[in-house]
Amino acid sequence: MWIKHLYREWIGRFIFRKLNIGIGAALLLIFLLLGLVVYNNFYSILEKKEHELLAFRTEKLRMQFLDIMERFKYDSMSLYQNSNMQSSVYEMFLPENIPEDLDDRKAITERNYIKNVMTHMLSRNPYTSSVIMYRLQDERLFVESQQQRYGVNSAFPYKAFFESFPKTYQHPYFGSSEQLLAPSDQMLYIVNPIYSPTSIRPDQVYGYHLITLNTQTITNEFDSESSDYRLIIKQNGAVLLDSRPDEQSDWSESQDLISQVAIDPYEIEMIGISYKSNLQSKLADIAVRILIILGLSWFVCIIIIHLIQRFIVGRFNQMSKHFKKVQRNPFTPLMPVSGEDEISDLMLRFNRMAQELQNHISQVYIAEIRKRNAEFIALKTQIHPHFLYNTLESLRMQAVISEQPFLAEKLYHLGRLYRWMLQPTDDLISVQEELAHTTYYLELLMLGKSNRIEIRVVSEINLENCFMLKFTLQPVIENAIQHGQLEQYDDPVITIAIKREGELLFIDIYNNGKDITAEEHNRLQLLLQTENTFPEQHLGLKNIHERIKHYYGNEYGLSLPERLSETRSFQLTMIFPYKR
């Protein structure tokens, strides 16, 4: 009875309330259907993108494997080539050339020469974890690995292992093993026999040339950012690598995303797998957002319908026109508000929502674009970095041989700086390390210049125990050189004063170059304090300031103190938390 009483009291006597309830129910049903459609579309798009990314990763791994094979084939052919001072490695495997005593001079020379050859092979192929050569005549084993990580496993039957390979022309041979080297580790190996180059007979083998690939390195290369992907590598139906932890079932029967590529010359098949369950978990947050957005949209629609029925159509038309402007351009100026009634309140709420939308676009969307551009630029700079490393090292060694120590030192600094900039280390590094690489940069910048700029570091604390964001000091130094016009002044000096105050680390940078006007000082201070601005000048300082704030919090970043001394034309302070 009380339900009928409430209906009669609050709804039955009001036709517009009945209409609002009917329209609200219809809109709720429509929004639910719309949410289902949007969710399905999102899932289809995400699944398509995920499959494209999986295909890209699988194809990239295939190309890397082909590159490994090409380098391996080149190394195998180099075993038959004579150098200027030594015979070929192949000749050392002939029975008549094998030293009888392992401690005589010939054996030592042979061991050192083969070690150098294997070390050079490791430097040419960064994906190779170790190189092994086995001589059948005296069962001699030569092993070299990256950073001397692996050694001979005394419990492994090397003789039976190498003699098990077929005596055919069908090589190289592929396989996997956990006990091949010590310490034990799952590895893929690639083997080529060593024949006589003048009479290649499959049953006349003098030794074997083998390289190993760490399976963990291959898996990380395939999925370096997460653990959502799995990799299977087969050769002639035999499984060489399967990164699935528990599922050893037939991958072809799986309903997950699959990307399959083949390396036909070696009958190798690579299968990349992405679990749909991970895809659905990623979509869970989107589903919640869709429900929230549709719920808010439904609520706003009810309010708008209610206001249309009660208030002036003209003011509604005014709002409708503004809605269309925002639809075309989210950065349309806010709607003018007059009065204090419900329509004015709706206008204010819409303005706040539009402002939040503009802030969201500026903070998230534009930031995402800049991030993707930075990732793309970083990707371009990382293409074949080892080629540049090897080239710089070759140039440095040539300079050393030519007795040009100054040029050799600068090439060494350039290689160290480039490797440091591209290595995937943590964001936090010690202040000492940042200062060292900033010094490398300045020394390279000063090449060929008579008026050299000096960096002076003033600090009473241990800089090895202080940490800062990587690559934040060098852009500040570069900015000081450019805007301070230091090269036009006598004895230019950039002073870096580092001190601790409580739990804060202050790094003051000032120089004796061009002075800065009060107007420029205020404009730069305003630039650092203003959110979501992207200036044409001092963009580097602004990026560093936003980077520090984003990583540590708004109380950290760059600061411009008032001018304190006539000897300091310009001072900039970097503020970090003091962490040991």
Image (spheres, rainbow, N blue to C red):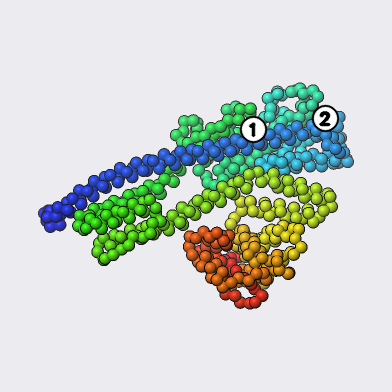
Secondary structure category for the residue under label 2: loop
Q: Nearer the viewer, residue 366 or 64?
A: 366
Residue drawn at x 83%, y 49% as measured from the top left: 401
Is residue 559 shown above or below 44? below
Q: Nearer the viewer, residue 212 or 372?
A: 372
Residue drawn at x 44%, y 55% as measured from the top left: 361
Q: Which amino acid, by three-letter code, is at mark 1?
A: Gly
Is residue 58 shown above or below 398? above
Q: Which amino acid, by three-letter code, is at mark 2?
A: Leu
Location of the C terminus by quadrant is bottom right
Label located before the other in sequence (1 or 2): 2
Measuring from the top left, give residue 247's x and y in whole percent: 50, 37
* Residue 523 shown left or right of residue 10 in the figure: right
Residue drawn at x 72%, y 43% as measured from the top left: 123
Q: Nearer the viewer, residue 167 or 297?
A: 297
Secondary structure category for the residue under label 1: strand
**Residue 94's mark?**
2
Location of the N terminus by quadrant is bottom left
Measuring from the top left, give residue 40's x and y in whole percent: 37, 40
**Residue 486's mark?**
none
- Residue 89 visible, this orientation: yes
Which quadrant of the view contains residue 150? top right
Q: Nearer the viewer, residue 256 or 438?
A: 438
